[in-house]
Every structure is written in structure tokens, then in C-alpha cells.
Amino acid sequence: MDHPSNRSELTRRSLVRVGLSTAAVASASTVMAQGAPTSPPAKPGALTTAPTSQTGLSPRLTLHAIDNFHGTPAAGMVCDLAMLDGEGYKPLKTITTTATGRPADPVLIDDAFKAGHYELVMHFEDYFSKLGVKLPNPNFLSLVPIRFQIRDAGQRYHLPVLLTPWGYSYYRGS
Amino acid sequence: MAGISTHVLDTDRGRPASGVRIDFSMMEDGKWRLMRSVVTNADGRTDKPILPGGEAKVGQYELVFHVTDYLKARSGTAEADIFIDDPVVRFAIFDAKQHYHVPMLCAPGSFTTYRGS
């Protein structure tokens, strides 16, 4: 299951998917040579969590950060949430994802869950550098703003973010 | 080729997104300075590079994609279904000799960007 050549193959394929150069492949090998990082997530491709269905839950905003570079949940990702208020984004809270790539609690729920324009700034550079990924200086992506709208506070909103050092994707999930 | 270029694609309809305004800024003394506003052409690209190679230098850059107006103007799109909110992409030029192609793929409910080529 955990044969080194399998892991190597997996990582190479994911690198091809995100369009990385041979130099980046070499840096990924460095990561693997260092073994599992001291903080979560675990080694590339290691998964111990099952998918979670949130169907039927009350209105709320939830987040899931997924590390498509390592093939793991993005654990320990620091995110600053702000809401548009008049002219600018007003900070609401800073949250950190757990080992599942999700925060321990809903990002917003009950009275705090309001319709509006939101920005979640995710600390990509800190996240990847802590895992020993070799990054350019300055890194291509460092503080990544995710802007979205909650249009109806009577509905449940799930925000998955798929990330690598070279790109990201977000969408209204389920 | 060096500098910055972009491409706006509507992955919901499978076609380039034309007429999308893009505001391009760079970080100067800790503040974003608007360099230019451009509008995508019929191919979803800009007629001129966002940042010509001769002007490229190491630093932080920002692209704001004003796609809400574009999405609202499409036939058959309910405004209530638009989840992405004029996405902002902030990235660094770390080597001014390289080219940075920063495409964005959008639909009412999703957004993707990456270092392209």
C-alpha cells in the first residue's frame, strides 16, 4: 500500500496535472526524502479520513481545504475571513483547518451567518513552506483571496478550495 | 517572452468570455497601484499583454476579474446562482525573465486559476 515507488508515481502524476517543471519534480523528491512533516498532513497520498456528507444540516458556511499537491487534506491552513462593509473588507475571524482540512466548527452559523460579500484569505505560502516544499522567493502564490457571495442565508453553503503552489480552484460545494 | 498575460474562459458554456473588465495592479510601497483596466476580446484575451516584458520586475501583482456583469448578462443565468464574486488573483513575479500566463476559468459557481503557459 505504502510502497515508495507507488508514492513517487502518484506524486509525479499530480505534478504533471498541475503543469510543473522538472525542477519542481526535483523539489517534490526533496519533500519525500525528508519523510513525513512534523505537522499534519501526513506523507503524500496518505488518507485516513472518509468523505463527509452535510446534507440536511441547517444553514451555515463550511470550508474544506484540499491539498492537490500532496493528495491530502490541507491541515493547519490559516484563513482570515472578512466581509464587505461599505468601502472595504472588515475582518471577522481567523480560522485554522484541522487534520481533515476542515475547521473544527462551521465558519459561519446561526446569527453570524448573513448574506453578503465575503473574502477568505488563505495563507498558501506558509502552508507549503511548513511542509518543506521548495518555493520561489517571492512565491507565486502567498496570501490568496477567495471572494464569494452568500446570497441567501436560508441555504447551506459549502466552500471547497483545491490548492497547489501554482494554482487553485474553488466552487460552491455540497 | 516575459511579462504577464491572461485568458478568461467560461467553462459553463465552453467558450471564451469576452467583454470582461480586468483591473491590473501592482504593489508599490505596500499599496496596490492600478496600472491599467482592460476588456477581454472575442477570444477572452487582451489585445495587448497585461504587462509587457519590458516592464516586468520582481514584485506582487493583482488581477481583478469583473465577471459578475458578464455572468448576469448571459441568457439563462439566475443571479441567485452566482457564487463567485469578481475573483481577485494575487501573485508574484519571482523572475522577471520568465513569462507569467495567469488564466482564469469561471462559471457562476466556480473559479480556477493557475500558472499557465
Image (tube, helix red, strand yellow):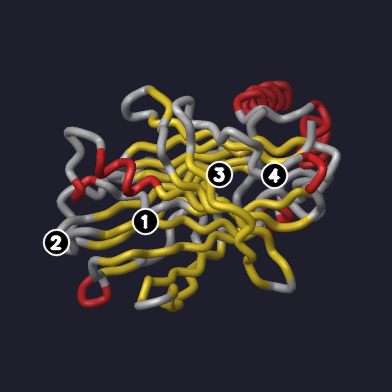
Q: Does label 3 or label 1 sit earlier along the sequence?
A: 1
Question: Residue shown at 42%/42% (left/top)?
Answer: B20
Identify the chain of the residue marked 4, using the numbered disc in the image. B
Q: Are marks 2 and 3 on the same chain?
A: yes
**Residue under circle 2?**
A154
Identify the disc placed on residue A148: 1
**Front position in the image: A33 or B46:** B46
* Helix, strand or loop at mark 3: strand
Which quadrant of the rendered structure holds the N terminus of chain A?
top right
Amino acid type of the residue that numbered disc 2 sits on in the rendered structure = Gly
**Residue under circle 3?**
A163
Q: Are marks 1 and 2 in contact (CB under 8 Å)?
A: no
* Helix, strand or loop at mark 1: strand
* Helix, strand or loop at mark 2: loop
Question: Is A53 positioned to the left or the right of A32 in the image?
Answer: left
Q: Is residue A44 visible?
A: no
Identify the disc placed on residue B51: 4
Q: Position of residue A84 (x, y in %)?
A: 37, 71
Question: Is A155 positioned to the left or the right of A49 in the image?
Answer: left
Amino acid type of the residue that numbered disc 1 sits on in the rendered structure = Phe
Question: Residue shown at 71%/26% (left/top)?
Answer: A8
